[in-house]
Amino acid sequence: MSAKPFAETRHAPAPELLAKAEVLVEALPYLQRYAGAVFVVKYGGHAMGDPELARDFAEDIVLLKAVGIRPIVVHGGGPQIGAMLKRLGHESAFVDGLRVTDAATAEIAEMVLGAINKQLVTWINQAGGRAVGLSGKDAALITATKVSRTRRDEGSMIEQVVDLGFVGDPTGVDRTLLDVLTAADMVPVIAPIGTGADGHTYNINADTMAGAIAAATGAARLFLLTDVPGVLSKDKRLLTDLDPAAIAALIADGTISGGMIPKLETCVDAVTRGVDAAVILDGRVPHAMLLEIFTRQGAGTLVRKEPA
Ligand SMILES: Nc1ncnc2c1ncn2[C@@H]1O[C@H](COP(=O)(O)OP(=O)(O)O)[C@@H](O)[C@H]1O
Ligand SMILES: CC(=O)N[C@@H](CCC(=O)OP(=O)(O)O)C(=O)O
């Protein structure tokens, strides 16, 4: 019995199966490019609201790990800290997007972030990963320096120092523990709390914390997951590519405001300190991170040091 020529035995797969194979083929150059790279992912408190989406997020992290990327997760929890403070009758004010933090607020923030941290660890482990929950206190990962802000009243020439209490900047990062964990195929999940040289607990903005960790670990990518599609223009179009000069112009003309300012400042800081690119993504879209990483089209706003 003679065998049929190869071409005659091939059957075209059903279009929907072919489409699945094409997705994998499209991902191939990205899988090759990013094998072994560190990706730092900031998961914001707003994006965490829906447990279904949180499970999708956990699956995405485990998938990144499975294809040889080394993900490090930094989480927020601003809305959850706010809700707990309200329940306890201890509400706080914000200055430039930072929560004014007295000693009691720092204690409550650490407690709420600790609970969120373990929930995220559980979700990632349930998805098949091996996550380890940390805060910046563990193995002296983060040394925080008290943040100082100044304010000038309208018409006044006098700059006043605003005391934000125990709000810290992550000025020192010791990456040793992160290297140990990622080398052992574990996923560090980090709460934005650090210790000051004075031994006090400092509350750190989670975007700032993620940016500092991305720069210190030489991350290829920094992802900031939030509750908008990315950076929007004045007429609400998605701005897909930005660089530091374009960002400065958008802040100056008021297109970018509120919580988006510290986010983009973090992106600019990260790309100027060696991170290849930072991406602002919609955490409400299931698997937005996978679309951004593994498809030609991408998603959200990509920030690079040089114009696209
Ligand atoms: N140009 C802009 N494009 C998109 N969002 C913007 C812009 N300017 C201001 N924002 C605001 O920034 C918010 C995101 O920042 P923030 O609330 O601090 O997010 P998160 O809690 O996820 O860290 C958006 O919900 C939006 O209200
Ligand atoms: C100093 C400061 O503002 N810390 C933040 C830390 C949490 C955070 O940043 O959470 P999101 O990313 O969810 O906003 C806070 O207390 O809300």
Image (cartoon, grey):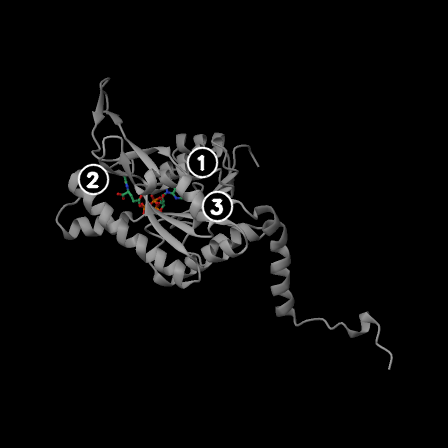
Residue under the image location 38 percent in, 63 percent down: 52
Where does label 3 land, which residue?
39
Farthest-out residue, left: 89
The quadrant in which residue 169 appears is top left
State which tag comes first along the sequence, 2 or 3: 3
Residue under the image location 51 percent in, 39 percent down: 277
For label 3, the crowd category at 10 Å Cα-Cα, with few meaning under 14, some 14 to 19 and many 20 or more, is: many
State which tag comes first along the sequence, 2 or 1: 2
Q: Is mark 3 within 8 Å of ligand 2?
A: no
Which image quarter is the C terminus in?
top right
Where does label 2 land, which residue?
93
Q: Is residue 88 left or right of residue 283?
A: left
Q: CA distance from mark 2 to mark 1?
A: 29 Å
In terms of secondary structure, where does tag 2 sit? loop
Where does label 1 land, which residue?
215
Q: Is mark 2 within 8 Å of ligand 2?
A: no
Q: Position of residue 103 (x, y in %)?
A: 17, 39
2 or 1: mark nearer the eye: 1
- The disc labelled 1 sits on which kind of residue? Ala
Q: Position of residue 33 (x, y in %)?
A: 60, 46
- Say if 139 sits above or below 113 in the image: above
The quadrant in which residue 233 appears is top left
State which tag comes first along the sequence, 1 or 3: 3
Residue 296 seen from this side: no
Q: Is residue 260 left or right of residue 295?
A: left
Q: Position of residue 304 (x, y in %)?
A: 52, 36
For label 1, the crowd category at 10 Å Cα-Cα, with few meaning under 14, some 14 to 19 and many 20 or more, is: many
- The disc labelled 3 sits on which kind of residue? Phe
Residue under the image location 49 percent in, 43 percent down: 221
Label 1 with label 3: CB-CB less than 8 Å: no
- The disc labelled 2 sits on which kind of residue? Ala
Q: Is residue 243 left or right of residue 134?
A: right
